[in-house]
Amino acid sequence: MNMQGLRVNEMNAKLRGLFAFRFIELHSKRMFEVELLLSAYSTTSIQDAAQFLEVSEEDATNYVLLHGWTLDPASQILTVTKKATVKWQKLDPDELQRLTEYIFHLEH
């Protein structure tokens, strides 16, 4: 392969990396925005969701429906489906001791 071909391949690799980074960055931002909506509202209008997410009403509706929200077609109101909260479980000292012994056994 000649030098120009190597440069093109290097440039393509850099561009792919930049596009991947930008995609991840935008996806993370969108997920953060959706999490904000989830925590702030139990219901919201399609118009408000679209404005908050900075997308069209159709795109906002499709996006949140994919994430488990529901839509009342008559009122055009989206209902947020709250995720189940994870509760931390306290370990019984005997369970913790058994677990420690088991891990110790695996390591030695």
Image (spheres, rainbow, N blue to C red):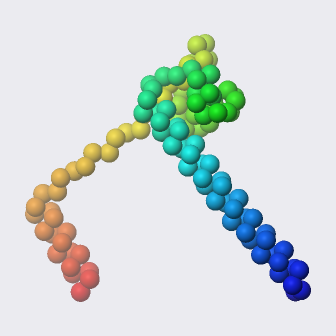
Task: Depth check: give the residue in front, 75 or 101.
Answer: 75
**In the image, 4: left or right of 71?**
right
Q: Identify the image quadrant of the N terminus.
A: bottom right
Task: Depth check: give the residue in front, 58 or 33.
Answer: 33
Q: Identify the image quadrant of the C terminus.
A: bottom left
Task: Depth check: give the residue in front, 65 or 7.
Answer: 7
| Residue 99 in the image, given as x and y percentages of width and height | 19, 69
Residue at 44 percent of width and 25 percent of height: 42
**In the image, 91: left or right of 7?**
left
Residue 65 visible (yes or no): no
Residue at 23 percent of width and 75 percent of height: 103
**In the image, 23: left or right of 91?**
right
Q: How many marks?
A: 0
Residue at 58 percent of width and 23 percent of height: 48
**Quadrant hosting residue 91:** bottom left
Residue 51 visible (yes or no): yes
Task: Using the image, determine if residue 15 lies above or below residue 32.
Answer: below
Task: Using the image, determine if residue 22 lies above or below residue 55.
Answer: below
Task: Using the image, determine if residue 8 lies above or below residue 19.
Answer: below
| Residue 63 in the image, given as x and y percentages of width and height | 62, 36
Residue at 89 percent of width and 86 percent of height: 2
| Residue 41 in the image, given as x and y percentages of width and height | 45, 26
